[in-house]
Image (cartoon, rainbow, N blue to C red):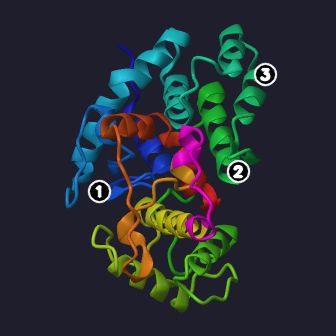
Amino acid sequence: MAEISPAGLEQLIAEEGDVLRAYRDVAGVWTIGVGLTAASGVVVPKAGMTLTKAESRKLLVRALASGYEPAVAKVMPGAPAHAFDGAVSFHFNTGAIERASWVKAWRSGDKGAARSGLAAWNKAGGRVIAGLTRRRAREADLILDGRRTVPGQAFGGLRRGDEGEAVRALQDDLVRAGLWGGPVDGVFGASTEKAVRAFQASHPNLTVDGIVGPATLAQIARVLAARKGLAATAAGGTLATGGAVAVQVEGSIPDPSLLPNGIVLAVVFVAIAALNLVAWRYRDEIRSLIRLRRS
């Protein structure tokens, strides 16, 4: 059976990020490694669980073999290793290899149409995301030309010294969550790092290192979601109960432990296993909406 190459695996990890300590994503689902939840079928993350880099890679390999690699092999039979690697990266991020129009163009040898088709998969939440645009370009180079380009800044997290819109978005979230007083200037300086460290210290499942990776981003998003839920309740509104992505991103199931002043919302968690499966199904969209704020 076709499988991703060692180089392809490392590039996928660089694109996605690798968290070696279990954390709860924005939906409250325990997650570890390269975005793996219990619904992945290869690991059951829980509080306090840690992995080594080697263990994380083994789990990712198992998850890819359970569905992603076979799906790519089915629609791209005989693909050379570089094309297979790029397609697995695309599929892991989007889950769309079986319906993406660029695949048909690739099979017919139309590189131009395949490249433009790949480029079209650059939106999250209805808007173009710069990080996705760059990722699709890297995947196109790999699939079509065999040119491998590992992200210049793998998703190792935002940290002191970084500058730009990603930092500005982080600072804005910290301010909106009541975790920091600003300024929102797009410069990750001493005061931003201090606020991040204080936030991490208040959540025992986070590593206090001042680096804003997937786990810290998810926790900040959940704080924002809980505050939004409280505001809606105080105003006499009801929490959103739309589609699965809206439920998880908009925070219709707030975490009681995040509520200020000891206020606790009574939340009935029905069909926990089903929620877990939904969280896994839509993890790519969720991660895009959170992670790619750094683009």
User: Taking the image as drawn, is residue 151 in sight?
Assistant: no
How many angstroms separate mark 3 from mark 1 (CA)?
39 Å
Query: Which quadrant of the view contains residue 140?
Result: top right
**SS at circle 2:** loop
How many angstroms separate mark 2 from mark 1 (CA)?
26 Å
Q: Residues within 10 Å of mark 3 (few under 14, many from 20)?
A: some
**SS at circle 3:** helix
Q: What kind of residue is marked 2?
A: Ile
Q: What kind of residue is marked 3?
A: Ala
Residue 190 image offset from top left, x and y in percent: 52, 91
Q: What kind of residue is marked 1?
A: Leu
Residue 160 image offset from top left, x and y in percent: 51, 81
Q: Height in image: 99 above or below 160?
A: above
Q: How crowded is mark 2: few (under 14 residues within 10 Å), some or many (20 or more)?
A: many
How many angstroms separate mark 2 from mark 3 (CA)?
21 Å
Q: In this view, does 272 lie to the left or right of 47?
A: right
- Could you tell which of marks 2 and 1 lies nearer the N-terminus? 1
In the rendered structure, which segment of residues is drawn in magenta?
A: 232-247
Q: Name the residue under label 3.
A: 113
Q: Height in image: 2 above or below 37?
A: above
Residue situated in front as seen by the camera: 22 or 235 = 235
Residue situated in front as seen by the camera: 27 or 111 = 27
Q: Name the residue under label 2.
A: 129
Residue at x 40%, y 28% (from the top left corner): 4
Front: mark 3 or 1: 1
Residue 181 lies in magenta, yes or no?
A: no
Residue 142 image offset from top left, x and y in percent: 59, 33
